[in-house]
Image: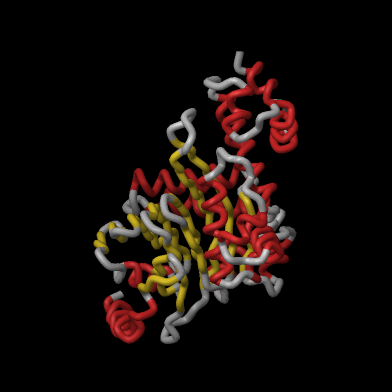
Amino acid sequence: MALISKIINKWYQKNKHLFFKYKDGFFHLNFVANSPVLMMESFKKVIFSKFDPENNVVLSNTPFSDIRVQFAFLEEGLTLLNSKMLYKKNVSFQGVRNGEFPNDYYTLSFHTFSNTFNNKGLTLNSINFSDKRWIMTKPEYLAFAAYSEGCESESIMVFFNKKWFDNYIKKDKAYKNSKVKDFFESDDIFVLWPDNSVELSRMAESIIATLDQYSIQNPLQLKLKTYELISAFIRSYNPQNIFKNYKNLSKNDILRINRVEFYLLENIHSKFSGIEFLSNKFSVSPTKLKSDFKSAYGVGVFTYFRNKQMHLAKELLENNEYQVQEVAQLFGYENTSKFSKAFEAVNGMLPSKVVYSKM
């Protein structure tokens, strides 16, 4: 580890211009993506960072983000990473490679994102949105992700190198009959899909809880839970990869779409502002806006906005604090019947049914 740290220090001094810059309204924070060890060493280089060597935890509290990253090296070729991040400004992350080290790690990861927005109306104090998704990557993939101010994220990532993959996953009988085999034998370097498995998400959350409670001083539980997650993943893998075209977006496209999404959620209580308005506001043609947004989120701009509105509307009605007419007006629907129609299209039931079920 000392030798690796020495090499990284030398390489970092030569390439430190890559690791922090401000452009297009985002603070860009990069990291070395060859392996978990190199990633940990590069995170230690983040400004204002503190490192806890006993638990392999990196803490960094800056004017633009508050970050906690923990590594658990379970066995040769198998590592866990748990990250918890609060973004005080617009921030993006980009993986880079150090050519002096091999790059042979796959990842399986579970990510949760949430934003809390101040509501401009009088009915609510704040609105919280959350989104969960899974990502699987090959060594060729270099991550790029952008987060808007106010976003919080938490991730659990399982890293396994090619040797571990060959010795364990490829030899598993379930793997040979699993659709996950198609991904590993394809030319795709990553696959991203929304969380649609209660079993897998609970397993991922259990691993996070185990890390929080026991740290890395009790690796047996972590190792067993990680093996169980990978096994369940192989058995159940059948993603509706609605984000398949995401890989065709450039970094600038991703940053722009991220800002469009943030604007939509910031104005979730209002009527949909329209494609023309959004294209003018974010300096992009209507056609490209619609195409890029669908590539990033799997649905059109209006559908995404309506779905978020109706999911939140359902939560408000379930809390039994608001009447249907009040919620309809909150989201800009003067006509309750039109609101009910939109609600049913998204949630599969009329809003009145939600209200009556709580009586």
Q: Residue at x 63, y 23 (%)?
A: 324
Compare residues 138 and 281 and report the one nearer the observer: 281
- Residue at (38, 58) in percent of width and height: 89
Is residue 165 at least partly visible in the picture? yes
The quarter of the rendered structure image containing the C terminus is top right
- Residue 310 coordinates in the image, percent (x, y): 64, 36
Residue 201 is situated, as x and y percent measured from the top left of the image, at: 56, 45
Q: Quadrant of residue 106?
A: bottom right
Q: How many marks?
A: 0
Position of the N terminus by quadrant: bottom left
Residue 204, placed above or below residue 279: above
Please indicate whether residue 221 sits to the left or right of residue 274 in the image: left
Name the quadrant containing residue 21: bottom left
Q: Is residue 174 visible?
A: no
Residue placed most toward the observer, 113 or 269? 269
In screen coordinates, is 209 left or right of 158?
left
Residue name at image x 31 percent, y 61 percent: 58
**In the image, 335: left or right of 210?**
right
Say if 75 sits above or below 343 in the image: below
Residue 80 or residue 347, whichever sits in front: 347
282 to 151, vertically: above or below: below
